[in-house]
Amino acid sequence: MNCKKMVGIFAIFVVLSCLCTSVASAHRLHIESTLSELEIEAYFGSGAPVQDGDVKVYDKSGNLYIEGTTDEEGKFRFPPKIGMDEYEVVVNATHMPGHKGETTINLSQVSADGAGTELPLYSNIIAGFGYLIGIAGFAMAYVYWKRNKK
């Protein structure tokens, strides 16, 4: 196979791989919670924890229930108030102004299905490699087909 065809195939591969990439969200703020005691975990899209982030927890009427800061792992724990089943949590990243995350935790509707959540960063990376392997396989099949056509 001559060099011009290989360069052409490589160029098509590069263009297709650029079209198949997803939007990166390196500074998106994520919040997760657990129910043993209410634990808030705040982190950026890159997986880095929001350290010393200002946390404010409101009840469903909008009254401030508790406030504090996240630890070095991006976590903040607070005791749930008896009879309160919904919390509005707001986290501001103090070291990166402008990065703010909000979520509502409804203890009466907590489910384990995880619907509506984003994939973790490692899943996005694995999916990206899967796309690239698929494109490379398509390119190899095309080269094989062209070689046997002659």
Image (cartoon, rainbow, N blue to C red):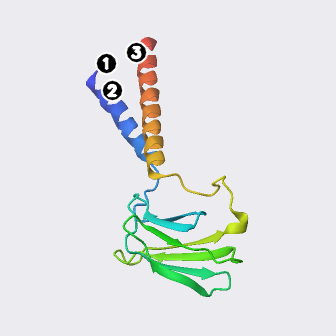
Q: Which residue was labeled with disc 1?
A: 1
Instruction: Residue at the far left: name it.
Output: 3
| Amino acid type at mark 2 | Lys
Q: CA distance from mark 1 to mark 2?
A: 7 Å
Query: Of marks 3 and 2, which one's residue comes earlier in the chain?
Result: 2
Contact flag, marks 3 and 1 (Cβ < 8 Å): yes
Query: Of marks 3 and 1, which one's residue comes earlier in the chain?
Result: 1
Q: Nearer the viewer, residue 119 or 87?
A: 87
Q: Nearer the viewer, residue 77 or 106?
A: 77
Is residue 116 placed above or below 124 in the rendered structure?
Answer: below
Q: Which residue was labeled with disc 3?
A: 147
Q: Nearer the viewer, residue 48 or 8?
A: 48
Circle on res. 5: 2
Instruction: Residue at the far bottom: name it.
Output: 63
Residue 68, position in %: x, y? Answer: 46, 80
The answer to whether residue 29 is seen in the rendering is no
User: What quarter of the picture does the N terminus occupy?
Assistant: top left
| Amino acid type at mark 1 | Met
Q: Secondary structure at mark 1?
A: loop
Is residue 79 placed above or below 123 in the rendered structure?
Answer: below
Q: Secondary structure at mark 2?
A: helix
Crowd rating for badge 1 (residues with CA inside 10 Å; few <14, some 14–19, many 20+): few
